[in-house]
Amino acid sequence: MIKIKGLENMEQFGEILTKHLSAGDIILLNGDLGAGKTTLSQFIGKALGVKRNINSPTFNIIKSYQGETLKLHHMDCYRLEDSEEDLGFDEYFEDKAITLIEWSQFITEFLPPEHLIINIKTVSPTERDIEIKAVGQHYLKIKEAVEHEMLVD
């Protein structure tokens, strides 16, 4: 478990995570409303060198941004809860970009078999607990590197 105490600590986590990501990586961001999924997405975008403001893509579902060397796809699948609609997810997943997915539980049938899961739990207004789960060897290496740098016991 990674303990996050404030926005600076969340930004540090986003920077450490981002430096271990590579083109084509898929990250599922899970947590209740207001847990910090979009905030973490903003910090990942900043670490990638995205200049545009990253906000929740709730009404667009998918927004894409250009970073210094990699693209970033940010998906918010909340509105797809009762939908069977495939919005061409494969095109995004196969793109050489970092893909962040909020509310991924609503599109599980479209997700690639391997990905990184980041569960964010609200502890207090300024504190979060983050749990990282890896599905696949590539993501296990990312998980171990990030936890090591964040000094997780």
Image (spheres, rainbow, N blue to C red):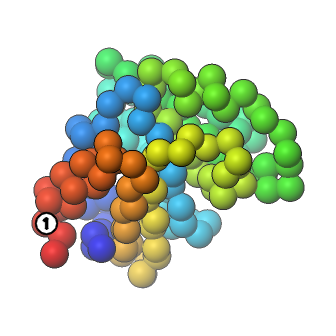
Q: In this view, does 54 lie to the left or right of 109?
A: left
- Residue for point 31% across, 58% down: 10
- Residue for point 75% across, 41% down: 59
Indicate the position of residue 14 as horizontal and vertical percent values.
Answer: 31, 49
Q: Residues within 10 Å of mark 1 (few under 14, many from 20)?
A: few
Indicate the position of residue 30 as horizontal and vertical percent values.
Answer: 53, 61
Q: In which quarter of the image is residue 6?
A: bottom left
Indicate the position of residue 151 as horizontal and vertical percent values.
Answer: 13, 66
Q: In which quarter of the image is the N terminus?
A: bottom left
Q: In this view, does 83 lie to the left or right of 55?
A: right
**Residue 19 in sight in this render:** yes
Of residue 16 and residue 105, the one placed in the foreground of this image is 105
Give above or below for 91 relative to 131: above
Mark 1 is on which residue type? Leu
- Residue for point 42% across, 81% down: 124
Q: In which quarter of the image is residue 61?
A: top right
Please give the count of numbered marks on the rendered protein. 1
- Residue for point 24% across, 40% down: 20
Indicate the position of residue 24 as horizontal and vertical percent values.
Answer: 43, 29
Of residue 18 and residue 110, the one placed in the foreground of this image is 110
Of residue 51 and residue 35, the one placed in the foreground of this image is 35
Q: Quadrant of the C terminus?
A: bottom left
Give the residue at mark 1.
151
Give above or below for 97 relative to 45: above
Identify the secondary structure beneath mark 1: loop
Q: In this view, does 153 lie to the left or right of 29?
A: left
**Residue 71 in sight in this render:** no
